[in-house]
Image (cartoon, helix red, strand yellow):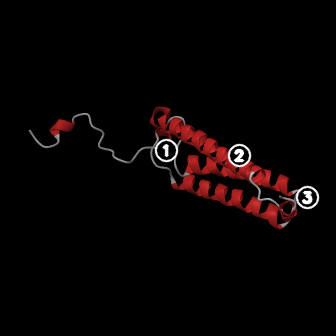
Amino acid sequence: MNAHSGHAGHDHDHGHHDEDEGGHGTLKGYVTGFVLAAILTAIPFWLVMDKVFPSSRTTALVILAFAAVQIVVHIVYFLHLDARSESGWNMLALIFTLVLVVITLSGSIWIMYHLNSNMMPVSTHDMRNMP
């Protein structure tokens, strides 16, 4: 009995899966992801530099939208996560992580906002009128 007889039926084609089968991406996929990421970076830069929108709030919301799209591009083209990879467990873990990050960030911002508005130091005018 040789050393490889215990691996009967084992796939010896390590790391040579097609992109559709959950393997590593192709050069075309990486270049596509890079081009999309560069475009999704250049457009918000242009929006800010040329002051396309009169309101800074509108500019910030558009930049956040571009950032969300860029996150999706990175996840699909560079991390190769989709609903099919590992029976969807990777995507489920990613969604769970995103929910926790949103809860943590929104909770932190909420707490800091309320601390700022409720715990502001007393102004000098109010200090002079204190007994």
* Residue that label 3 marks: 54
Q: Is residue 60 above or below residue 83?
A: below
In which quadrant will I find the N terminus?
top left
Tell me which amino acid carries mark 2. Answer: Trp
Q: Residue at x 54, y 52 (%)?
A: 78
Circle nearer the N terminus (2, 1) = 1
Label 2 crowd (10 A; few <14 / some 14-19 / many >=20): few
Circle nearer the N terminus (2, 3) = 3
In the rendered image, the residue lying farthest to the bottom is: 49
Q: Is residue 82 visible?
A: no
Q: SS of the residue at dot 3?
A: loop
Labelled pair 2, 3 in contact (Cβ < 8 Å): no
Label 3 crowd (10 A; few <14 / some 14-19 / many >=20): few
Image disc number at residue 110: 2
Q: Is residue 98 above or below residue 26?
A: above
Q: Residue at x 30, y 39 (%)?
A: 11
Give the camera-side residue of 80 and 100.
100
